């Protein structure tokens, strides 16, 4: 229902702020979407397709993928017995994004490993790929190097934990300069500017059961990243 988005944003506005310690939250990215759309004068998915996805040749990246891909080519999101009461395929699992119709700043983007890697390669290149510039070098430098004073995270990206590498979402061998993100559904993408390396891992740990935590408990993503660094050392 179209009223969901208005109601959700009003609840964010009405929620009192807490003390200034670090909390992981989707609210910042939900509000960032509202800012982007206000400045761009168009929905976020149209803006991203126009400025990034189409010129970069990302044909399998976007929100609400049933609009441009057949269902059988889309990995199921999850079985939702509570809110949607069905198997989700081609629609976002995240409930907050669902209330925005599957188009939200915090979740809902579908893609492939190749397409994700191209986005991160563009960032590694300082905002340029295939001879075309998408972001300034200064913007890339700021958002991939600046870190928070009260957490390990940077501006829009996760970072290794400098104090205790085992606490972060990276392999202990990853240098401090690495930046990227992990996704709730079982994904990750990391850029290592020191070794000029892009690592993308896409899976769907929440299908069919959202409570499946084996990927996290076994540290699969970190161990694969560690194996990459081990292989590089052997060379």
Image (spheres, rainbow, N blue to C red):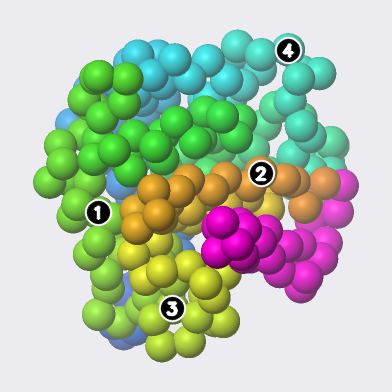
Q: Position of residue 170 (x, y in %)?
A: 54, 67
Which circle's residue, 4 or 3, is located before the other in the chain? 4
The residue pinned by badge 2 equals: 202
The magenta segment is 208-235
Is 216 rendered above or below residue 193? below
The residue pinned by badge 1 equals: 143
Cα distance between the residues tagged 4 and 2? 19 Å
Direction from residue 148 to residue 233 in the image, left or right: right
Cα distance between the residues tagged 2 and 3? 22 Å
Q: Quadrant of the N terminus?
A: top right
Point 36% across, 78% down: residue: 151
Q: Residues within 10 Å of mark 2 (few under 14, many from 20)?
A: some
Q: Quadrant of residue 71?
A: top right
Query: In the image shown, does 135 or 11 lie closer to the viewer?
Result: 135
Q: Residues within 10 Å of mark 3 (few under 14, many from 20)?
A: some
The residue pinned by badge 3 equals: 161
Q: Are marks 1 and 3 in contact (CB under 8 Å)?
A: no
Q: Position of residue 234 (x, y in %)?
A: 60, 62
Q: Quadrant of residue 133?
A: top left
Can residue 196 be seen here? The reply is yes
Which circle's residue, 1 or 3, is located before the other in the chain? 1
Cα distance between the residues tagged 1 and 2? 23 Å
Direction from residue 59 to residue 227 in the image, left or right: right
Q: Are marks 2 and 3 in contact (CB under 8 Å)?
A: no
Which circle's residue, 2 or 3, is located before the other in the chain? 3
Residue ranking furthest to the bottom:
163
Point 48% across, 87% down: residue: 164
Cα distance between the residues tagged 1 and 3? 17 Å
């Amino acid at each position: 229902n179209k009223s969901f988005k208005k109601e959700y944003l009003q609840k964010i506005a009405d929620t009192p702020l807490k003390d200034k310690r670090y909390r992981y939250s989707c609210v910042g990215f939900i509000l960032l979407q509202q800012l982007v759309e206000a400045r761009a004068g168009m929905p976020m998915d149209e803006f991203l397709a126009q400025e990034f996805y189409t010129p970069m040749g990302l044909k399998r990246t976007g929100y609400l993928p049933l609009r441009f891909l057949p269902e059988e080519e889309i990995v199921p999101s999850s079985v939702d017995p509570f809110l949607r009461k069905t198997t989700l395929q081609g629609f976002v699992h995240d409930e907050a994004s669902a209330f925005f119709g599957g188009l939200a700043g915090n979740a809902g983007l579908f893609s492939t490993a190749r397409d994700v890697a191209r986005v991160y390669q563009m960032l590694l290149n300082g905002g340029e790929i295939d001879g075309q510039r998408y972001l300034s070098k200064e913007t890339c430098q700021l958002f991939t190097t600046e870190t928070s004073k009260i957490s390990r995270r940077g501006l829009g990206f996760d970072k290794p934990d400098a104090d205790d590498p085992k606490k972060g979402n990276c392999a202990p061998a990853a240098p401090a300069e690495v930046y990227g993100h992990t996704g709730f559904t079982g994904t990750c993408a990391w850029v290592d500017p020191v070794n000029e390396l892009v690592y993308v891992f896409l899976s769907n740990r929440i299908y069919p059961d959202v409570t499946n935590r084996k990927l996290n408990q076994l540290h699969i993503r970190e161990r694969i990243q560690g194996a990459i660094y081990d292989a590089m050392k052997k060379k």
